[in-house]
Amino acid sequence: MPTYRNFGEYLFYSYANLQMLCYALGAKKPKYDRLCYMIRAKAFKAYKEGRWNIHDLMQFNVAKIRENDFCWYCGRHMSPDKLTIDHVFPRSKGGGNDMDNIIMVCKNCNSSKSNMDLFQWYATVRHEWPPLNVLIHYLKNIYLYSEENGLLEKCDIELDEMELPFNRKYIPVSYPQPEDFDPDLFGTEQ
Protein backbone atom coordinates (compact mmCIF):
# COMPACT_ATOMS: atom_id res chain seq x y z
CA MET A 1 0.00 0.00 0.00
CA PRO A 2 1.44 3.39 -0.92
CA THR A 3 2.06 6.27 1.42
CA TYR A 4 0.01 9.39 0.79
CA ARG A 5 1.33 12.92 0.71
CA ASN A 6 -2.13 14.34 1.30
CA PHE A 7 -5.83 13.57 1.46
CA GLY A 8 -6.20 13.90 -2.31
CA GLU A 9 -3.79 11.02 -2.90
CA TYR A 10 -5.70 8.93 -0.37
CA LEU A 11 -8.95 9.58 -2.24
CA PHE A 12 -7.31 8.85 -5.59
CA TYR A 13 -6.01 5.51 -4.30
CA SER A 14 -9.43 4.63 -2.92
CA TYR A 15 -11.04 5.55 -6.24
CA ALA A 16 -8.41 3.62 -8.24
CA ASN A 17 -9.14 0.54 -6.11
CA LEU A 18 -12.86 1.07 -6.73
CA GLN A 19 -12.16 1.21 -10.47
CA MET A 20 -10.27 -2.06 -10.15
CA LEU A 21 -13.28 -3.63 -8.42
CA CYS A 22 -15.67 -2.29 -11.08
CA TYR A 23 -13.48 -3.71 -13.85
CA ALA A 24 -13.19 -7.12 -12.15
CA LEU A 25 -16.95 -7.31 -11.57
CA GLY A 26 -17.67 -6.28 -15.16
CA ALA A 27 -15.22 -8.90 -16.48
CA LYS A 28 -16.64 -11.46 -14.00
CA LYS A 29 -13.25 -12.09 -12.46
CA PRO A 30 -13.76 -13.72 -9.04
CA LYS A 31 -10.29 -12.63 -7.88
CA TYR A 32 -8.08 -9.69 -8.76
CA ASP A 33 -5.41 -10.64 -11.25
CA ARG A 34 -2.38 -8.95 -12.76
CA LEU A 35 -4.49 -6.93 -15.22
CA CYS A 36 -6.69 -5.64 -12.36
CA TYR A 37 -3.64 -4.41 -10.46
CA MET A 38 -2.28 -2.78 -13.61
CA ILE A 39 -5.58 -0.93 -14.05
CA ARG A 40 -5.38 0.28 -10.44
CA ALA A 41 -1.78 1.45 -10.86
CA LYS A 42 -2.54 3.31 -14.11
CA ALA A 43 -5.64 4.95 -12.61
CA PHE A 44 -3.86 6.03 -9.41
CA LYS A 45 -0.96 7.53 -11.35
CA ALA A 46 -3.28 9.32 -13.79
CA TYR A 47 -5.37 10.82 -10.95
CA LYS A 48 -2.26 11.99 -9.07
CA GLU A 49 -0.83 13.59 -12.21
CA GLY A 50 -4.14 15.28 -13.03
CA ARG A 51 -4.53 13.47 -16.36
CA TRP A 52 -7.76 11.80 -15.21
CA ASN A 53 -10.55 13.44 -13.27
CA ILE A 54 -13.33 12.13 -11.09
CA HIS A 55 -16.47 13.27 -12.88
CA ASP A 56 -19.56 14.94 -11.49
CA LEU A 57 -22.69 13.13 -10.34
CA MET A 58 -24.91 13.86 -13.37
CA GLN A 59 -25.13 10.20 -14.43
CA PHE A 60 -26.12 9.13 -10.92
CA ASN A 61 -28.63 11.94 -10.55
CA VAL A 62 -30.37 10.84 -13.75
CA ALA A 63 -30.37 7.23 -12.50
CA LYS A 64 -31.86 8.33 -9.16
CA ILE A 65 -34.75 9.97 -11.00
CA ARG A 66 -35.34 7.09 -13.42
CA GLU A 67 -34.85 4.25 -10.95
CA ASN A 68 -37.01 5.43 -8.08
CA ASP A 69 -38.70 2.17 -7.11
CA PHE A 70 -36.15 0.78 -4.66
CA CYS A 71 -34.07 1.75 -1.65
CA TRP A 72 -30.58 2.66 -2.82
CA TYR A 73 -29.12 1.51 0.51
CA CYS A 74 -30.66 -1.95 1.03
CA GLY A 75 -31.98 -2.64 -2.48
CA ARG A 76 -35.55 -3.50 -1.45
CA HIS A 77 -38.06 -2.74 -4.20
CA MET A 78 -41.10 -0.66 -3.23
CA SER A 79 -43.33 2.00 -4.68
CA PRO A 80 -41.86 5.51 -4.78
CA ASP A 81 -44.39 6.79 -2.25
CA LYS A 82 -42.90 4.41 0.35
CA LEU A 83 -39.43 5.89 -0.07
CA THR A 84 -37.99 8.84 1.82
CA ILE A 85 -35.29 11.34 1.01
CA ASP A 86 -31.96 10.82 2.73
CA HIS A 87 -29.18 13.37 2.74
CA VAL A 88 -25.99 11.51 1.91
CA PHE A 89 -24.04 14.13 3.84
CA PRO A 90 -26.38 14.68 6.81
CA ARG A 91 -27.93 18.13 7.02
CA SER A 92 -26.80 18.30 10.64
CA LYS A 93 -23.22 18.12 9.32
CA GLY A 94 -23.68 20.73 6.60
CA GLY A 95 -25.09 18.57 3.81
CA GLY A 96 -27.30 20.50 1.42
CA ASN A 97 -30.60 19.86 -0.32
CA ASP A 98 -29.01 19.71 -3.77
CA MET A 99 -29.56 16.73 -6.06
CA ASP A 100 -26.00 15.45 -5.53
CA ASN A 101 -26.70 15.00 -1.83
CA ILE A 102 -30.18 13.48 -1.99
CA ILE A 103 -30.95 9.80 -2.42
CA MET A 104 -34.19 7.80 -2.13
CA VAL A 105 -34.18 5.17 0.60
CA CYS A 106 -36.65 3.17 2.66
CA LYS A 107 -37.78 4.48 6.04
CA ASN A 108 -35.89 1.71 7.87
CA CYS A 109 -32.55 2.62 6.30
CA ASN A 110 -33.16 6.35 6.74
CA SER A 111 -33.94 6.09 10.44
CA SER A 112 -31.16 3.56 11.05
CA LYS A 113 -28.54 5.74 9.35
CA SER A 114 -29.76 8.88 11.07
CA ASN A 115 -26.93 11.43 10.84
CA MET A 116 -24.08 8.92 10.60
CA ASP A 117 -21.45 8.94 7.91
CA LEU A 118 -22.66 6.58 5.17
CA PHE A 119 -19.54 4.38 5.13
CA GLN A 120 -19.50 4.31 8.93
CA TRP A 121 -23.15 3.20 8.98
CA TYR A 122 -22.51 0.34 6.55
CA ALA A 123 -19.43 -0.76 8.51
CA THR A 124 -20.77 -0.50 12.05
CA VAL A 125 -24.54 -1.02 11.75
CA ARG A 126 -25.15 -3.04 8.59
CA HIS A 127 -21.79 -4.89 8.67
CA GLU A 128 -21.62 -5.07 4.88
CA TRP A 129 -20.30 -3.22 1.88
CA PRO A 130 -22.60 -0.66 0.28
CA PRO A 131 -23.98 -1.52 -3.15
CA LEU A 132 -21.57 -0.57 -5.91
CA ASN A 133 -23.59 2.45 -7.09
CA VAL A 134 -23.75 3.77 -3.52
CA LEU A 135 -19.98 3.32 -3.11
CA ILE A 136 -19.32 5.23 -6.32
CA HIS A 137 -21.86 7.96 -5.51
CA TYR A 138 -20.56 8.55 -2.00
CA LEU A 139 -16.88 8.49 -2.91
CA LYS A 140 -17.57 10.98 -5.73
CA ASN A 141 -19.47 13.19 -3.26
CA ILE A 142 -16.50 13.13 -0.88
CA TYR A 143 -14.08 13.96 -3.68
CA LEU A 144 -16.20 16.79 -5.11
CA TYR A 145 -16.75 18.28 -1.64
CA SER A 146 -13.02 18.02 -0.91
CA GLU A 147 -12.07 19.64 -4.20
CA GLU A 148 -14.58 22.46 -3.72
CA ASN A 149 -13.44 23.12 -0.14
CA GLY A 150 -9.67 22.87 -0.65
CA LEU A 151 -9.19 19.64 1.28
CA LEU A 152 -7.18 17.67 -1.28
CA GLU A 153 -3.81 19.11 -0.22
CA LYS A 154 -4.51 18.77 3.51
CA CYS A 155 -2.89 16.15 5.75
CA ASP A 156 -4.65 13.91 8.26
CA ILE A 157 -3.95 16.15 11.24
CA GLU A 158 -5.48 19.18 9.51
CA LEU A 159 -8.58 17.18 8.53
CA ASP A 160 -9.02 15.86 12.07
CA GLU A 161 -9.28 19.45 13.32
CA MET A 162 -12.09 20.27 10.87
CA GLU A 163 -15.81 19.61 11.02
CA LEU A 164 -16.55 17.66 7.86
CA PRO A 165 -19.80 16.16 6.54
CA PHE A 166 -18.04 12.78 6.21
CA ASN A 167 -15.79 10.68 8.43
CA ARG A 168 -12.52 10.24 6.56
CA LYS A 169 -11.54 7.27 8.74
CA TYR A 170 -14.23 5.14 7.10
CA ILE A 171 -13.27 5.86 3.50
CA PRO A 172 -12.14 2.48 2.17
CA VAL A 173 -8.70 2.31 0.67
CA SER A 174 -9.14 -1.28 -0.45
CA TYR A 175 -12.09 -3.47 -1.35
CA PRO A 176 -12.78 -7.18 -1.02
CA GLN A 177 -12.19 -9.68 -3.80
CA PRO A 178 -14.97 -9.46 -6.41
CA GLU A 179 -16.43 -12.85 -5.41
CA ASP A 180 -16.66 -11.65 -1.81
CA PHE A 181 -18.11 -8.27 -2.77
CA ASP A 182 -20.86 -9.72 -5.01
CA PRO A 183 -21.19 -13.47 -4.40
CA ASP A 184 -24.44 -13.56 -6.41
CA LEU A 185 -22.52 -12.63 -9.56
CA PHE A 186 -20.33 -15.71 -9.16
CA GLY A 187 -22.98 -18.10 -7.77
CA THR A 188 -21.19 -18.54 -4.46
CA GLU A 189 -22.66 -18.44 -0.98
CA GLN A 190 -21.38 -16.22 1.79
Image (cartoon, rainbow, N blue to C red):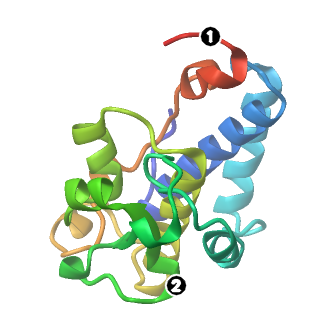
123 vs 172, left or right, is left
- Could you tell whether 26 is left or right of 152 in the image? right
Q: Which mark is residue 27?
A: none
Q: Secondary structure at mark 2?
A: helix
- State the residue at coordinates (77%, 45%): 42
Q: Residue at x 71, y 17 (%)?
A: 186
Where is residue 131? Give x, y as percent: 53, 45
Measured from the top left, where is residue 84 in percent x and y?
37, 71
Q: Nearer the viewer, residue 67 or 21?
A: 67
Residue at 53%, 48% (x, y): give it.
Answer: 14
Up-down relation of residue 167 to residue 74 (above or below): below
**Mark 1: secondary structure:** loop
| Crowd around label 2: few <14 · some 14–19 · many ≥20 (10 Å) | some
Question: On the image, which quarter does residue 89 sit in?
Answer: bottom left
Q: Is residue 26 above or below residue 5?
A: above
Q: CA distance from mark 1 to mark 2?
A: 36 Å
Q: Earlier in the sequence, mark 1 or mark 2?
A: 2
Residue 51 placement, left or right of 173: right
Q: Residues within 10 Å of mark 1 (few under 14, many from 20)?
A: few
Residue 4 spot, x, y in % from top left:
45, 50
Q: Quadrant of residue 27?
A: top right
| Horizontal and vertical percent position of residue 144 | 52, 76
Quadrant of the rendered image containing residue 50:
bottom right
Camera-side residue of 7 and 187? 187
Q: Residue furthest top?
A: 189
The residue identified by callout 1 is: 188
Which residue was labeled with disc 2? 99
**Residue drawn 56% across and 28% down?**
181
Residue type at numbered disc 1 = Thr
Residue 152 visible in the picture: no
Amino acid on which disc 2 is placed: Met
